[in-house]
Amino acid sequence: MVMKREGNTLSSVLRDAWDTGNMYVMTRNAPLTATNAHIGITSHITQEELLKTLGQTEMFNGFGNRFLWS
């Protein structure tokens, strides 16, 4: 899973974008920014795979509760 790679900032970038509308990816040679962004994420996952791959950190740091699980 990409988010579990050391140094990955995906979780924090998505949480900041959700909370502020601003996205900053500063780990590139040419940093990217988006201000007043409206983001949407569409994904498909089975319940079994979600329970297996979503770590406790993501469950409790506010990442997991930004999605509508159905």
Image (cartoon, helix red, strand yellow):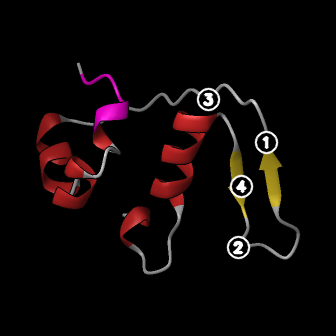
Name the secondary structure under disc 4.
strand
Q: Position of residue 28 (x, y in %)?
A: 77, 72
**How many numbered marks have been drawn onto this rendered protein structure?**
4
Q: In 3D space, how far apart are the residues under numbered discs 2 and 1 (Cα atoms)?
A: 15 Å
Residue depicted at x 16% and y 58%: 56
On screen, residue 42 versus residue 62, left or right, reads: right
Q: State yes or no: residue 44 in magenta.
A: no
Q: Which residue is mark 2?
A: 27
Crowdedness near tag 2: few (<14), some (14–19) or many (≥20) residues, C-alpha within 10 Å: few
Q: Position of residue 13 (x, y in %)?
A: 56, 53
Q: Residue furthest top?
A: 70
Q: Position of residue 65 (x, y in %)?
A: 29, 34
Q: Which residue is mark 3?
A: 39
Q: What's the residue type where badge 1 is placed?
A: Ala
Which residues are the magenta region? 65-69
Q: Earlier in the sequence, mark 3 or mark 2?
A: 2
Name the secondary structure under disc 1.
strand
Q: Which residue is mark 1?
A: 34
Q: State yes or no: residue 68 in magenta.
A: yes
Residue depicted at x 72% and y 30%: 37
On screen, residue 51 versus residue 38, left or right, reads: left
